[in-house]
Structure formats: structure tokens, C-alpha cells
Amino acid sequence: MNFNEKYNLIKNLAKTELEIIEKTMVSQINTREPLNNSLIKFLTLPSKRIRPLLAILYTKAQGEELTQKQLEHLTVVEMVHNASLIHDDIIDESKLRRGNKTISADFDNKLAVISGDYILAISMEMLTKIGNIDLINKFAHTIRQMCLGEINQNFDRFKIGTIENYIEKTKNKTAYLFEVALTGCSILSQNQKNTENASQLGLNIGIAFQIRDDIINMTNFDPTKPAHNDYQEGIYTAPIILGEQSDNYTSGIEKTKVLLNNYLQSAKKQVETLPNNEYKTALEEFLELLNDV
């Protein structure tokens, strides 16, 4: 089986919860046509839903069923993620997202900016209704760091930085949203003893996920993305940093695979603390999938 086939088997364990999240997202959209339909289509296009999936598996591995507030929290996570994708497509001047026209291509950049802000505003309104100040603070910090990650990346274009700066950027742009997905469910749980473990697992998986994506970007394993698009934009990721030069990164790719494995091994240690059940097994299988590059 290929990556998608294996991933879909894991995803099926959270099918009911993910369907609720998608329906909740759609129910929040209420603007003028034809934008309304385009936003709903964008939110419901085939997607991995990795962040809510991992949080669902982690919660259910502890013997808990997700509450309405936890599902609303994961809806917020997914809406924040999708708002960031709309903005990313503007920045990257992308015409396609998941095989369909982007909001900016379908309309224009001005309306796309507002559309991303609109989805973000809805998510914040949902978050305040959940009514947990710790969770609100976590999201505020996460969104701030996501913005800082983009800002710093822009100023660092065409510069080969340090691996420490790369990891920090990766936390900001990617890992903190993974973390808030897992820790948010823990914060809203009756049993909050695993919040720190959830935080570390979210960060480790988020960093590993981005490292894997950066390897694929440099090796063109993903046929839906052009090879070296980050490189051409002057965004130098781990393969170039560890290869110590921008025009010969073969050795850097091998070193980056070692870096990826290190974060996955750390994530495995957090998963090992969970009770033995099908959800823990699914998390372990997901980590194995991320190591397949």
C-alpha cells in the first residue's frame, strides 16, 4: 500500500469525529455568493485533516470519547489552518490547491485576504464560546508565532541559516498548530495529567511533518508539487543547511533524514506512555509513515 492508502486506514478510526468537524466548519460560513460556495468547497475538498486526526487518536487512546467542546476546539484548529492556507496561496501566487483553483485565483488577492481573515474571525468567535481562557491564550500564542514564522522567513530569503533557526521557524510555521490541537483536547479533558506529554508529542510530530515535507520538496517525491519550489524562492530548508551549500544538497538530504528520525523517535517515546489499544497502534503507524521518504 502507498502512503495515502495506509493513511486512510488510520483516518477511518476517527471518521465520525472528522465528519462532525467538517459539518461544523461548513455551518459557520455565511457570506455572499459566489464566494460562499467557493469557501465551502475549499473547506470540504479532500484533505488529510492531520491535526484533528492526531488529537482524536491521542484522546481516544486514553479511553476517552471526545466531548462537544473538544470537537469545537478541533474545528477551530482546522479553520485556522485553512485560513493560513488561503493566505499562503496569496503569498506563493498559487493557482491550485488540492487540485482546485485557489480562492485568490478564483477571485483576486484582495478578496482572498479578507476571506482568510473572515475564516480566522469565525474561528476566534467559536473559541471564545468554548470559554476556556487557557485555550484562548494557547491559540493567541500559536497564531502570533505562525505570523512571526512567515515574517522571519521572508527576511531570511536566500540566506543559509543555522539548523537551530530552521527548527525554530518550523515550530512557528507548523509545529505550534499541531501542539495546540493535542494540548487543547487535554486542557478540555477531565483528566489533564497528560497535557505536557501531549504538548511534546504535538511539537515533535509537527517538526517531523515539516522536515518530511522539506525533504519531499527537494526530491520531488510529491507529484502534486513542483520540485525545489522553496529553493527557487530562496527559502533554504534543512537539506541545504545541513549540506552547507545551496547548489549541492545530496549529503544534506541524507543528514535531514537522520534529523527527521530523531524527532520521530522522540514522538514514539510520548506515544509509548499511552495504554495499548488500536488508537495507540494507529499513532505508531502514523509515525512510521512519516519516516517513509
Image (tube, rainbow, N blue to C red):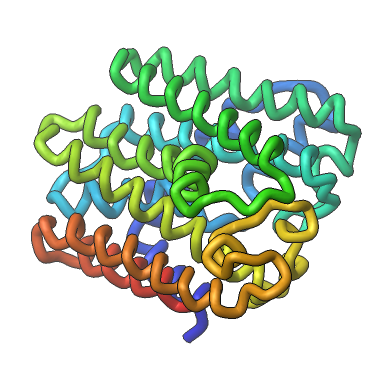
Q: Is residue 4 left or right of residue 276?
A: right
Residue 11 at x, y percent in the picture? 41, 62
Q: In this orientation, which residue lies closer to the viewer: 157 or 43?
A: 157
Q: Is residue 172 left or right of residue 11?
A: right
Q: Is residue 226 visible?
A: yes
Residue 88 at x, y percent in the picture? 71, 41
Q: Residue at x 85, y 51 (%)?
A: 95
Q: Residue furthest front?
A: 244
How many numbered tags mark residues here? Answer: 0
Q: In this orientation, which residue lies closer to the viewer: 223 or 66?
A: 223
Residue 292 at x, y percent in the picture? 45, 78
Q: Is residue 177 above or below residue 293?
A: above
Q: Residue at x 31, y 32 (%)?
A: 184
Q: Is residue 159 left or right of residue 24?
A: right
Could you say which quadrant of the image residue 157 lies in?
top right
Q: Residue at x 47, y 86 (%)?
A: 1
Residue 4 at x, y percent in the picture? 52, 73
Q: Is residue 5 visible?
A: no
Q: Residue at x 28, y 54 (%)?
A: 57
Could you say which quadrant of the image residue 231 lies in?
bottom right
Q: In this orientation, which residue lies closer to the viewer: 176 or 20?
A: 176
